[in-house]
Image (cartoon, helix red, strand yellow):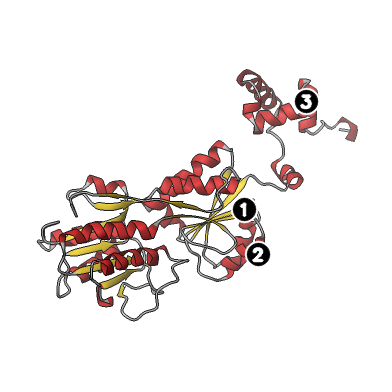
């Protein structure tokens, strides 16, 4: 075959000539379907498939516009945990609702620092970042600050960066004020990631995380301020830090709390998973909930409402948190920072 006899490469311009339409019409058929009638878009796509044209070149478009159409969602926890944790799953669902509407893709990124080259490659494929959960300072944290790409922080504050949070302090304080109405004898707090350790431990004299970084410390402040207003306090040996929000680890902390002396008759738990583990431990010990021990959670996951005794908890708007973060990233929401309210849901575990 002579060079001149080679078939012409199919491009958006070539397809526009073949179908006698503009290049913008071809591009809209693939990328902006709302700009065409359904019948016209279907005809263009069928004709393109018939001759083997698969659409405008994404790499070329990215180089031309400086946009990839991808959003990097940087997860503080590992991917397996984030996809199974009900709060994280709801948050990701909220993000997806908005990005699906805008035909943008989400690239889930782990914050682990074991392969810097791979991480840099992944981060180059996105237009910006939504960072879910506090990242400890390190290579990943430094790279994000150096990129200069748009970034939204979720569940922590980052100077110079737009953020989305729920009102953790008000939610925790309101739940504690409700629980204190029945004048418990001994109160214990089952916290979540209060100190820098991967072991279940009592807080005692360990240094707490900075509350700007750790939402758990904001919840702790809400609990302790409610107790102080009632003329009460919880000694540090009755405050536990649970390093990861899983049932197994929460079960260990709850068992330590309910076998301590004096045994607490009120448990303020910083997550529903911790609270549900505490209810399980109590029932296995032959204790009645709420007669012998009352339990309050935080998150509002569906499981807490479906079990007996049902869980009194602070409901946070996890899906709306995701939607707000996506709208901020896309510039659809004018507020620079978003603080979402919570709602106390009173059920059987602490009526």
Q: Quadrant of residue 204?
A: bottom left
Cβ atoms under marks 1 and 2 closer than 8 Å: no
Q: Earlier in the sequence, mark 1 or mark 3?
A: 3
N-term-proximal mark, 1 vs 2: 1
Residue 275 visible, this orientation: no
- Could you tell me how many numbered marks the image carries? 3
Nearer the observer: mark 1 or 3; the answer is: 1
The Cα–Cα distance between marks 1 and 3, rounded to whole angstroms, is 32 Å
Instruction: Compute the Cα span from label 1 to label 2.
Output: 12 Å
Q: Nearer the viewer, mark 2 or mark 3?
A: 2
Residue 179, given in percent of the width and then of the height, sits at 22, 59
Question: Which residue is nearer to you in this view: 208 or 275?
Answer: 208
Query: Which residue is label 1 attached to?
Result: 128
Q: Is residue 206 above or below residue 326?
A: below
Q: Residue at x 77, y 22 (%)?
A: 21
Task: Report if residue 304 is visible in the image.
Answer: yes
Q: Residues within 10 Å of mark 2 (few under 14, many from 20)?
A: few
In front of the other: 85 or 115: 85
Relative to 172, say whether 71 is above or below: above
Residues at circles 2 and 3 in contact by the CB criterion of under 8 Å: no
Residue under label 3, please give it: 22
Find residue 264 and report its horizontal and vertical position in percent.
17, 68
Q: Horizontal placement of 88 versus 163: left or right? A: left
Residue 32 in which image quadrant: top right
Could you tell me which secondary element the residue under label 3 belongs to?
Answer: loop
Q: Which residue is mark 2?
A: 146
- For disc 3, the neighbor class at 10 Å (few under 14, some 14 to 19, many from 20) is some
**Looking at the image, residue 48 lies above or below residue 286:** above
Rendering quarter of residue 184 = bottom left
């Amino acid at each position: 075959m002579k060079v001149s006899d080679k078939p012409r490469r199919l491009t958006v311009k070539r397809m526009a000539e073949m179908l006698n339409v503009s290049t913008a019409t071809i591009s809209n058929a693939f990328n902006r379907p709302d700009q065409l009638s359904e019948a016209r878009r279907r005809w263009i796509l069928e004709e393109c498939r018939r001759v083997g044209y698969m659409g405008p070149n994404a790499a070329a478009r990215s180089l031309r516009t400086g946009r990839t159409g991808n959003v990097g969602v940087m997860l503080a926890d590992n991917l397996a945990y984030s996809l199974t944790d009900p709060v994280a799953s709801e948050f990701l669902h909220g993000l997806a609702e908005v990005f699906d509407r805008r035909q943008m893709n989400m690239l889930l990124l782990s914050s682990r620092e074991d392969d810097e080259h791979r991480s840099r490659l992944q981060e180059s494929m996105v237009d910006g970042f939504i960072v879910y959960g506090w990242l400890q300072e390190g290579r990943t944290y430094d790279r994000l600050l150096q990129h200069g790409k748009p970034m939204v922080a979720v569940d922590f504050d980052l100077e110079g960066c737009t953020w989305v949070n729920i009102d953790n302090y008000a939610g925790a304080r309101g739940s504690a004020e409700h629980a204190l109405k029945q004048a418990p004898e001994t109160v214990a707090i089952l916290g979540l990631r209060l100190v820098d350790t991967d072991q279940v431990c009592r807080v005692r004299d360990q240094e707490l995380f900075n509350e700007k970084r750790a939402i758990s410390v904001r919840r702790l402040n809400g609990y302790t301020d409610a107790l102080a207003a009632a003329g009460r306090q919880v000694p540090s040996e009755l405050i536990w830090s649970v390093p990861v929000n899983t049932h197994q680890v929460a079960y260990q902390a709850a068992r330590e709390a309910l076998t301590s002396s004096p045994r607490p008759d009120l448990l303020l738990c910083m997550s529903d998973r911790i609270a549900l583990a505490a209810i399980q431990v109590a029932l296995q010990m032959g204790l009645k909930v709420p007669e012998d021990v009352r339990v309050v959670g935080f998150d509002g996951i569906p499981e807490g409402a479906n079990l007996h005794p049902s869980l009194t908890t602070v409901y946070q708007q996890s899906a709306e948190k995701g939607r707000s973060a996506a709208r901020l990233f896309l510039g659809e929401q004018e507020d620079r920072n978003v603080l979402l309210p919570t709602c106390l849901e009173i059920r059987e575990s602490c009526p």
